[in-house]
Image: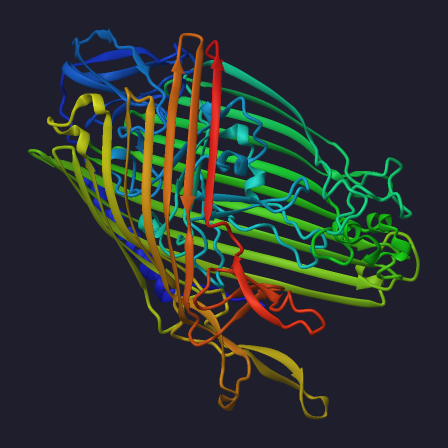
């Protein structure tokens, strides 16, 4: 089936708005700079330990003049106005530094900077959730930043490891011990019953696929993740915004939060090569009690009583992990490049094939990032990456043909003669190809106006193969299933900003628009009952099935934002995003999402003791949404056999022309800062979020002629919680640095209403019920355990939420000899 998108009227309206914005505001960028005497500023940027910093941003505030430090920390600023001038240096993860110098006309002056590492720097630059670059002190919502330069020596296998335990309110769930399996990510819990809760993911400004590569067969009960396609050695930093109070400018689909990944860039200077070699192991110890009697039924490491067991009596093995990465960066003041390639192989702890092959994942990737500066006020970047992953799975999970279920059940398994090695005869494999390319253009049309344009493509293909050989115990004549899914995401994103000042009041006016187009082509084939052993073609089975799905979805909108700053201390921001979506009902129209925020740097007051450090108070309110599925608002039909076998159709989905997005409203407030000369940093946030118009499948009244269910905007879900962060530089010496950090967060969800429904079963014992968290685990429990000689009384009870309500973590790092 197929459906092509966006109401044409909406698409033309959005494109028209984008075009008008470009035509109206671009002329305002006529240069307002007049000829004047200039000089050159040069120097070196280092950390407090003396190590040089590559990629630090050095600029002349308010002029648009800037440069990045090269591979040895050196920078050069050309055409700097002569006279007293302020120069600022900043780098993610470090506090900024400013110096006022006298720039000689026609000559140069040396200005060196030393930056101190800070987990939170109020002068630091952020871009996620803002219309353009903004200082952290101007932002009224919480934002987490992770700088990979501080994690170079940690055992990080993928981007999910970068996020694990490094930001309060971010939960990473490793779904399996199988190598290659993707993680589930939740930001501030769950707020949607039916439309998913995964955050949006951007790489260098381009939106990529944010859901796992699922398949219809899925005997492994695990799937690879798009994040697993990104080489962690290519990542420079990650920014995370966790709720609707911060994600308004991203519009529909952003209610689950936004993760933005920035990859490394080139820098002026000679080629600088880097090579990393990672070696490790995967190991899982004994599962269950050591005693001979196993009341829990955990037989994982005791298989000597049954046939087919490994010779050493242990189903679990030690898997080898290895990864090799090579990169080079360099360039000139006008052009720069970053090139990298990686190869990795990770073996899990389980066997996967009948010949003894281990479950595991093998992958390779390559990246090429290129930067061009045709003029001082124009920068163009091209970012390209390609990766390939090959995963051999072990059948697993809640699956009668799964290894762990059968092994752990001991004699109550499903395999012939309790020989669980038969499971390895099944072949389960995933092949994932992922390609992302994008262009980022920034244009400083005047000292007060800037423009940004992002355009790109994210393409991925997942080939899943599942095969039971001829003679397999579960399907004696064998079967084969092939599932191929190709996804394509297009991004077009423009924003402009006009900055001006009126005495002690600064003004920043921003506008822009985005257009996203998602396409999916999925083909599945199945063949069963073959004539004999050997290689199989799908069409040679006695039973064959095939189907295809094609969907195309367009989402776009425009935004306007106004920010005022007073004395560079208090910043008040108001904005609105208006979205259209091809999955909205025909009569729904556009979805507006407002935002308001305030940030106040209390420590900038004269009366605030300087020894107390820096302190910012903040509050934000915002709205975002989640769109319905591609066909949820449409009336669809299924083919059936009518009277006397004649072809006929019957309604499959009733359709709802008024169907709109879920709407999440969030209020958050908190504070952040540092003390003890930046050695102690802290942050606190409280958030209260409500999702109304939640999309719920409501059973229709049979008298209406339709007996199925229909998606309606009738549910309400609440979420609230606290997030805390503390980092402490315990010791700072010439050759030794010791840092300790901790994070704690809570999340309490509650389903207020399901539009009259009492319960929704999400699978087995997971439910959605009013008055309970989302989701909740419910099961029958004996109510009279102490009564003897009578029949047990069984009643269903809800035992609690499936997801944790409290998450905490602690980390420490030691640096010797500045390495």
Looking at the figure, which quarter contains the N terminus? bottom right
Q: Position of residue 637 (x, y in %)?
A: 57, 78
Q: Is residue 168 visible?
A: no
Looking at the image, residue 151 sits to the left or right of residue 514; the answer is right
Q: Residue furthest right?
A: 532
**Of 454 and 481, which appears nearest the observer?**
481
For this orientation, the residue located farthest to the left is 503
Q: Position of residue 601 (x, y in %)?
A: 20, 34
- Spot occupied by residue 88 in the image (x, y as percentages of width and height): 25, 21
> Please, is residue 396 above or below residue 777 in the view?
above
The colour style of the image is rainbow
Residue at image point 28% right, 16% down: 77
Residue at 89% from the left image edge and 46% from the top image edge? 305
Q: Is residue 617 above or below residue 421?
A: above
- In the image, residue 589 above or below residue 707: above
Whether residue 782 appears in this view of the structure is yes
* Residue 698, image x, y percentages: 48, 76
On screen, residue 789 versus residue 96, left or right, reads right
Q: Nearer the viewer, residue 496 or 135?
A: 135
Judged left or right of residue 318, residue 331 is: left
Q: Residue at x 8, y 33 (%)?
A: 504
Q: Is residue 60 left or right of residue 715?
A: left
Q: How many marks?
A: 0
State the residue in front, 670 or 563. 670
């Amino acid at each position: 089936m197929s459906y092509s998108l966006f109401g044409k009227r909406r698409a033309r309206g959005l494109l028209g708005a984008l075009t008008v914005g470009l035509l109206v505001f671009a002329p305002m960028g006529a240069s307002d700079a007049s000829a004047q005497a200039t000089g050159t500023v040069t120097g070196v940027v280092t950390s407090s330990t003396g190590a040089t910093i590559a990629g630090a941003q050095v600029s002349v505030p308010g002029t648009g003049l800037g440069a990045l430090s090269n591979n040895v920390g050196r920078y050069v600023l050309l055409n700097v106005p002569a006279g007293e001038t302020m120069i600022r240096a900043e780098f993610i993860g470090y506090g900024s530094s400013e110096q006022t110098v006298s720039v000689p006309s026609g000559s140069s002056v040396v200005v060196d900077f030393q930056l101190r590492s800070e987990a939170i720097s109020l002068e630091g630059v952020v871009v996620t959730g803002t219309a353009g670059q903004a200082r952290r002190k101007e932002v009224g919502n919480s934002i987490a930043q992770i700088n990979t330069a501080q994690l170079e020596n940690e055992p990080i296998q993928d981007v999910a490891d970068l996020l694990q335990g490094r930001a309060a309110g971010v939960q990473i769930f490793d779904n399996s011990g199988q190598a290659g399996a993707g993680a589930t990510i939740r930001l501030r819990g769950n707020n949607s019953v039916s439309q998913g809760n995964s955050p949006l993911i951007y790489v260098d400004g381009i939106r990529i696929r944010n859901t796992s590569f699922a398949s219809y067969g899925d005997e492994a009960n695990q799937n690879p993740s798009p994040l697993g396609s990104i080489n962690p050695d290519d990542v420079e930093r990650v920014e995370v915004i966790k709720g609707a109070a911060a994600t308004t400018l991203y519009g529909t689909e952003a209610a689950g939060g936004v993760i933005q990944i920035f990859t490394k860039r080139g820098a002026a200077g000679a080629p600088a090569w880097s090579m990393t070699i990672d070696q490790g192991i995967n190991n899982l110890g004994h599962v269950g009690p050591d005693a001979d009697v196993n009341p829990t039924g955990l037989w994982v490491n005791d298989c000597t009583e049954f046939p087919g067991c490994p010779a050493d009596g242990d189903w679990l093995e030690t898997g080898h992990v290895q990864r090799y990465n090579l990169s080079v960066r360099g360039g000139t003041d006008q052009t720069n490049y970053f090139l990298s390639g990686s190869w990795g192989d990770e073996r899990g702890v389980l066997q996967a094939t009948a010949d003894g092959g281990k479950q595991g994942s093998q992958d390779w990737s390559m990246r090429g990032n290129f930067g061009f500066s045709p003029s001082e006020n124009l920068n163009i970047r091209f970012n390209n990456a390609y990766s390939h992953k090959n995963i051999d799975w072990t059948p697993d999970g809640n699956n009668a043909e799964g290894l762990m279920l059968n092994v752990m059940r001991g004699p109550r398994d499903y395999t012939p003669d309790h020989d669980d090695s038969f499971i390895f005869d099944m072949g389960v494999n995933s092949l994932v190809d992922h390609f992302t390319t994008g262009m980022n253009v920034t244009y400083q049309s005047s000292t007060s106006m800037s423009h940004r344009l992002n355009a790109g493509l994210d393409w991925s293909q997942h080939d899943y193969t599942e095969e039971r050989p001829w003679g397999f115990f579960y399907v004696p004549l064998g079967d084969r299933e092939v599932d191929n899914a190709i996804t394509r995401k297009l991004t077009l994103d423009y924003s402009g900003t006009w900055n001006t000042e009126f005495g002690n009041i600064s003004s920043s006016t921003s506008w822009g628009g985005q257009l996203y187009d998602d396409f999916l082509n999925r083909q599945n084939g199945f063949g069963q009952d073959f004539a004999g052993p050997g290689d199989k073609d799908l069409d040679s089975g006695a039973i064959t099935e095939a189907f295809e799905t094609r969907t195309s979805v367009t989402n776009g909108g425009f935004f306007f934002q106004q920010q005022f700053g007073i004395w560079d201390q208090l910043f008040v921001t108001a904005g609105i995003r208006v979205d259209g979506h091809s999955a909205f009902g025909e009569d729904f129209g556009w979805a507006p999402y407002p935002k308001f925020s305030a940030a106040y740097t209390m420590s900038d007051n004269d009366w605030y003791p300087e020894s107390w450090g820096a302190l910012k108070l903040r509050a934000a309110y915002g709205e975002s949404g989640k769109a319905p599925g591609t066909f949820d608002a449409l009336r669809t039909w299924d083919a059936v056999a009518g009277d006397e076998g004649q072809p006929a159709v019957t309604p499959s989905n009733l359709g709802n022309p008024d169907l709109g997005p879920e709407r999440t409203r969030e209020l958050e407030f908190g504070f952040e800062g540092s003390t003890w000369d930046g050695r102690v940093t802290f942050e606190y946030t409280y958030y209260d979020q409500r999702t109304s118009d939640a999309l719920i499948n409501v059973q229709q009244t049979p008298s209406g002629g339709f007996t199925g269910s229909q998606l309606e905007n009738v549910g309400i879900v609440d979420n609230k919680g606290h997030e805390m962060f503390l980092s402490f530089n315990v010791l700072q010496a010439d050759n030794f640095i010791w840092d300790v950090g901790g994070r704690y967060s809570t999340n309490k969800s509650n389903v207020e209403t399901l539009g009259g429904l009492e319960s929704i079963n999400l699978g087995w014992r997971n439910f959605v019920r009013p008055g309970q968290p989302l989701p909740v685990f419910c099961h029958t429990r004996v109510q009279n355990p102490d009564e003897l000689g009578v029949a047990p009384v069984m009643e269903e009870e809800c035992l609690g939420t499936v997801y944790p309500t409290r998450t905490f973590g602690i980390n420490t790092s030691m640096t010797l000899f500045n390495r």
